[in-house]
C-alpha cells in the first residue's frame, strides 16, 4: 500500500474540459488536457495569452469564477483523489495546505489593509492548528526564508516594492509546505534583475521542500532555466509535451518551432524574425481538426478536419514519439 | 547621413511631496538619421520620461535638444506644431492609447485632417487607405472600433497613427511589450521594414534586451535617470564594461538549455530617484563598489564609441 502510493503520480489530469459562458456564447477554454506531475518535479506550461494555462491551474484548485463557468469535466487526480468530485470543505482543507498558488500580479494578490505577516499567518493558523501567536512567529520565519527581515512583518503591502511583494506571496504559498505549487507567471510583472532573484528563490525553496511545481509562463527562457518537463498549450490543448531536453533540442510541432523562430535571441543577431502568421483562433468558434491548422505551414485537408471521400477524419490525438516526448500532429513520424 | 537628434545634458525633474524626482539627470547622446537607438533599463529608470521629453510631450527642466542642428529646447507655438509633424510616438499599450469611440478610419485620419494637407476631394480617403495598407490593416476593418481588434492589430493602428504624417523621428515606447511573442515578431518586422523604406529614425525604449539587440544600431543603458553605458549594439553584447550592464544582461533568461549563463544576482532593488546623493547611483547594489564610488561619476569614452560611467571600469575588466 505504502509503495503503491509512492509510485503514483502526485497529480494526474485526465481529459480536462472547461467551458465558460460569455455573452450567450460558449467559450472553449480547455479542450481535453491530460498531464501529470511527479513529486518534486517542475512542469512548465507554456503558451500565449488566452491559451488556457491559467484556467488549467484554477481548475486544479477549483477557483474558477462560478458565474462564468459553464462546465468542467474530466478528472483531476491529486494523490489519487479526484478533486473535481471533492466536497467544498475538503477543497478548503487542500487549498493553501496541499496545493497552493502564486499569482501573477503581486500588487493585487495581497490584502492592502492587513500587515503581511498576518496574511501569511492566516493559512498557517487554519491548516496547522497552531495558536495565532505561534502562526505569526512562523509567518515571520517564512519571511526570513524568502529574504525579508522579520522586523518588516508588521508592515503593509504598499510599503514593499514589487519584487518584495512577490516574495511575500511566495512566503504565503509555501508557508504550509504544500506538495504542489501552482506558479502563474510569478515573475512576469517584475524587472529582469528582480526576476532573476525571484526565480532563484523559488528554485532553491522548491529543492529544499521537495515541492512539485507547475510553472505557467509565456517565456521560454524562464522554462529553460527552471523546469524539468514542458507542455506547450495552444487554444486549450496540449500540442506538444516532454522533457525539457526533448522540447528545446528537438521541437517537432510546427507551433513550438514557430514560437522558437519568433523569439529574438540575445546570443545572436538574425536579420529577420519569423513570426507565426495569423492569430490564435477564437475560443468561441474553434476550427474543426487541429486548432493550429489555420496558421500552420504544413496543414492539409485532414488537419483542417475536412471530410475526405465523405469520411470525417479521426480526431488528432496526443501520441508518443518516444517515452519522453508527446505530440499532437499527424505530420510527424 | 548626419545627426538627426542631439541631446545635451538633458534633465527632467518632477516635484513630489517627498522631494525632487530626478527622472532624467544629465543625459547626453546623438541619434544618426535612419538609425535606431535602443534605450534599455528597468522600470523607473527614466527611459520613457526621456523619450517623452525629447518629443516635447514633457518640458525639460534643463539642458538642450537639437533637431537637425537647430536648438529646439524651447520651441514657440509654430515651431512646436512643425516638430509634431516630424516627431511621433508609438505607445506601449495599444488598449489604452487609442480612442475607444473612434473608428480606425477616424483615428488614422485625425492627424491628416489637422495637417490640412489633404483637402482635395478624395485625398483624405486615399491617404488613409495607403497608410492602412502600409501597416497591414485589412480594408474591411476601417469602420471597426479598437475593442473589436486583437492586440497586434491595435498596435498596427498605433503605428499607422504615428506614421500618418511621415515623421522623421519615431519614439517607440515599449511597442511590443504588451504582445505575445508570435505577434511581437510581426510588429518588429513591420517596424524594421518601415525604417528601411522611409529612412525612419527610432528611439526604441524597452526593458527587453533581446528585442533591443534585434532592432537597434546603438544602445544606451540607463540606471536611475543616468546613462551608465552607451555603445554600438554588437559591442555591448560582446563586452559589457559597467557592472550594471553585466548584471542586466546576465539576468535575461536564455532558451539555450545547454549554456545557461552564470547569473549575477544583484543585491537589493533599484534605489529611490528622489533627491539622490551625488555618488554613483548603482553603488549600493554594485559588487565592486568602494569608497571611491561615492562621488559623481561622469560618462567617459573608454574605447572609440564605447562610453561607460564607472571609475573602476579598467580595473574590473582588466583593461590596463
Image (spheres, coloured by chain):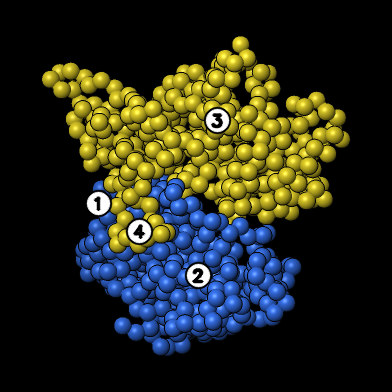
Q: Which of B81 and A205 is in front in this view?
A: A205
Q: Are marks 2 and 4 on the same chain?
A: yes
| Res. A187 visible in picture | yes
Residue position for label 2? B240
- Residue at the image point whose x is 74% and y is 68% from the top: B18
Residue position for label 3? A58
In the rendered structure, the answer to whether residue B194 lies left or right of residue A191 reads left
Q: Find residue B188 and name its label.
A: 4
Instruction: Name the subunit of mark 2.
Output: B
Q: Are marks 1 and 4 on the same chain?
A: yes
Tell me the SS state at disc 2.
loop
Is label 2 or label 4 in front?
A: 2
Distance from label 1 to label 4 (Cα)? 22 Å
Instruction: Name the subunit of mark 1.
Output: B
Q: Chain B is drawn in which colour?
A: blue
Distance from label 1 to label 3 (Cα)? 40 Å
Is label 1 or label 3 in front?
A: 3
Circles 2 and 3: CB atoms closer than 8 Å: no
Q: Quadrant of the N terminus of chain A?
A: top right
**Disc 1: CA contacts within 10 A as few (<14), some (14-19) or many (>=20):** few
Amino acid at each position: 500500500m505504502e509503495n503503491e502510493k509512492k509510485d503514483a503520480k502526485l497529480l494526474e489530469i485526465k481529459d480536462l474540459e472547461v467551458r465558460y459562458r460569455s455573452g450567450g456564447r460558449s467559450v472553449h477554454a480547455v479542450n481535453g488536457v491530460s498531464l501529470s506531475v511527479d513529486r518534486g518535479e517542475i512542469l512548465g506550461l507554456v503558451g500565449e495569452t488566452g491559451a488556457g494555462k491559467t484556467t488549467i491551474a484554477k481548475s486544479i484548485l477549483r477557483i474558477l469564477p462560478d458565474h462564468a463557468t459553464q462546465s468542467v469535466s474530466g478528472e483531476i487526480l491529486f494523490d489519487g483523489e479526484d478533486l473535481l468530485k471533492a466536497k467544498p470543505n475538503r477543497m478548503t482543507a487542500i487549498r493553501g495546505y496541499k496545493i497552493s498558488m502564486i499569482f501573477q500580479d503581486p500588487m493585487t494578490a495581497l490584502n492592502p489593509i492587513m500587515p503581511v505577516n498576518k496574511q501569511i499567518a492566516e493559512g498557517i493558523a487554519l491548516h496547522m492548528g497552531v495558536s495565532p501567536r505561534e502562526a505569526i512567529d512562523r509567518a515571520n520565519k517564512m519571511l526570513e526564508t524568502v529574504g525579508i527581515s522579520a522586523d518588516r512583518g508588521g508592515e503593509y503591502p504598499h510599503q514593499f516594492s514589487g519584487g518584495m511583494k512577490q516574495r511575500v506571496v511566495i512566503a504565503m504559498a509555501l508557508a504550509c509546505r504544500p506538495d504542489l505549487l501552482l506558479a502563474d507567471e510569478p515573475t512576469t510583472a517584475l524587472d529582469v534583475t528582480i526576476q532573476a532573484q525571484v526565480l532563484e528563490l523559488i528554485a532553491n525553496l522548491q529543492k529544499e521542500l521537495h515541492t512539485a511545481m507547475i510553472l505557467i509562463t509565456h517565456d521560454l527562457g524562464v522554462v529553460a532555466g527552471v523546469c524539468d518537463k514542458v507542455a506547450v498549450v495552444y487554444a486549450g490543448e496540449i500540442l506538444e509535451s516532454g522533457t525539457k531536453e526533448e522540447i528545446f533540442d528537438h521541437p517537432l510541432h510546427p507551433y513550438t518551432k514557430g514560437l522558437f523562430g519568433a523569439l529574438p535571441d540575445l546570443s545572436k543577431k538574425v536579420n529577420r524574425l519569423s513570426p507565426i502568421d495569423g492569430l490564435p483562433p477564437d475560443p468561441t468558434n474553434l476550427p474543426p481538426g487541429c486548432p493550429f491548422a489555420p496558421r500552420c505551414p504544413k496543414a492539409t485537408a485532414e488537419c483542417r478536419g475536412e471530410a475526405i471521400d465523405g469520411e470525417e477524419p479521426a480526431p488528432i490525438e496526443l501520441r508518443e514519439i518516444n517515452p519522453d516526448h508527446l505530440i499532437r500532429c499527424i505530420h510527424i513520424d | 547621413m548626419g545627426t538627426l537628434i542631439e541631446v545635451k545634458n538633458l534633465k527632467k525633474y518632477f516635484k513630489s511631496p517627498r522631494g525632487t524626482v530626478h527622472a532624467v539627470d544629465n543625459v547626453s547622446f546623438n541619434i544618426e538619421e535612419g538609425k535606431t537607438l535602443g534605450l534599455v533599463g528597468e522600470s523607473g529608470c527614466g527611459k520613457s520620461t526621456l523619450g517623452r521629453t525629447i518629443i516635447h510631450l514633457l518640458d525639460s527642466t534643463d539642458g538642450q535638444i537639437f533637431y537637425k542642428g537647430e536648438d529646439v529646447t524651447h520651441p514657440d507655438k509654430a515651431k512646436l506644431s512643425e516638430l509634431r509633424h516630424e516627431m511621433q510616438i508609438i505607445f506601449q499599450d495599444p488598449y489604452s492609447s487609442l480612442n475607444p469611440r473612434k473608428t480606425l478610419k477616424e483615428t488614422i485620419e485625425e492627424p491628416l485632417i489637422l495637417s490640412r494637407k489633404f483637402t482635395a476631394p478624395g485625398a483624405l480617403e486615399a491617404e488613409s487607405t495607403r497608410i492602412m495598407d502600409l501597416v497591414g490593416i485589412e480594408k474591411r476593418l476601417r469602420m471597426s472600433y479598437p475593442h473589436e481588434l486583437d492586440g497586434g492589430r491595435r498596435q498596427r493602428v498605433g503605428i499607422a497613427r504615428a506614421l500618418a504624417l511621415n515623421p522623421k523621428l519615431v519614439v517607440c515606447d515599449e511597442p511590443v511589450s504588451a504582445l505575445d511573442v508570435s505577434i511581437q515578431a510581426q510588429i518588429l518586422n513591420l517596424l524594421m521594414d518601415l525604417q528601411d523604406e522611409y529612412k525612419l529614425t527610432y528611439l526604441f525604449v524597452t526593458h527587453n534586451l533581446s528585442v533591443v539587440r534585434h532592432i537597434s544600431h546603438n544602445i544606451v543603458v540607463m540606471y536611475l535617470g543616468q546613462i551608465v553605458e552607451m555603445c554600438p549594439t554588437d559591442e555591448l553584447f560582446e563586452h559589457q564594461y559597467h557592472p550594471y550592464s553585466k548584471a542586466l544582461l546576465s539576468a535575461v533568461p536564455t532558451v539555450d538549455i545547454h549554456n545557461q549563463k552564470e547569473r549575477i544576482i544583484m543585491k537589493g532593488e533599484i534605489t529611490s530617484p528622489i533627491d539622490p546623493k551625488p555618488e554613483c547611483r548603482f553603488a549600493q547594489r554594485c559588487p565592486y563598489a568602494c569608497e571611491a564610488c561615492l562621488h559623481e561619476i561622469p560618462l567617459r569614452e573608454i574605447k572609440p564609441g564605447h562610453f561607460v560611467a564607472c571609475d573602476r571600469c579598467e580595473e574590473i575588466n582588466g583593461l590596463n
